[in-house]
Image: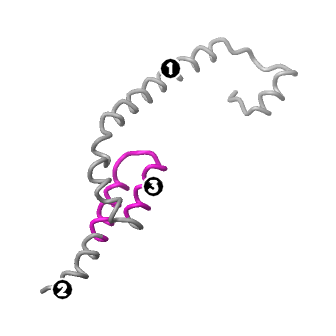
Amino acid sequence: MEAFAWWVWPILLYIGGIAAAADALWQGRTAQGTAAWVLALVLFPLGALPVYLFFGSRRFRGYRRARRKKDTRLAQRQRQIRKTLNDAELSPDKTTLPLKRLFRVPM
């Protein structure tokens, strides 16, 4: 039984790291954060697994909720600005038409 234990622990640790990496992939966070967690959990599970279990994605639910709320407010503001600009838009003339095409402004 003693000889069995020495090689089981690293395997269990790597399995835990891979499972936590899969969890990191499924949680909604930034692409950079996901890539960092996955790489750390797969390459260094001994150090990264305890850190992920303590600081993992479940700690950031409030952040995600606030971020989505702000994204919704930004989208509303964007619609207001577009409506205001569309109402004030002049038809393109000989001078402004090339500039609109150059800057790819929707017509």
Task: Say whether disc 3 or disc 1 marks the residue closer to the N-terminus.
Answer: 3
Q: Position of residue 66 (x, y in %)?
A: 36, 30
In space, the residues marked 3 and 1 are separated at their CA atoms by 33 Å
Q: Residues within 10 Å of mark 3 (few under 14, many from 20)?
A: few
Q: Which residues are magenta?
A: 14-41
Give the amino acid type for the residue marked by disc 1 in the picture: Arg
> Residue at the spot x=41%, y=60% of the render?
40
Residue 36, disc: 3
Residue 66, disc: none
Q: Residue furthest right?
A: 94
Give the amino acid type for the residue marked by disc 3 in the picture: Ala
Please, is residue 94 above or below residue 56 in the view? above
Q: Are marks 3 and 1 in contact (CB under 8 Å)?
A: no
> Residue at the spot x=31%, y=49% of the render?
56
Q: Which residue is mark 2?
A: 4
Please tell me whether mark 1 or mark 2 is closer to you in this view. Answer: 2
Task: Say whether disc 3 or disc 2 marks the residue closer to the N-terminus.
Answer: 2
Q: Residue furthest top?
A: 88
Q: Which of the 4 image quarters holds residue 95?
A: top right
Residue 77, disc: 1
> Residue at the spot x=39%, y=65% of the render?
44
Q: Quadrant of the C terminus?
A: top right
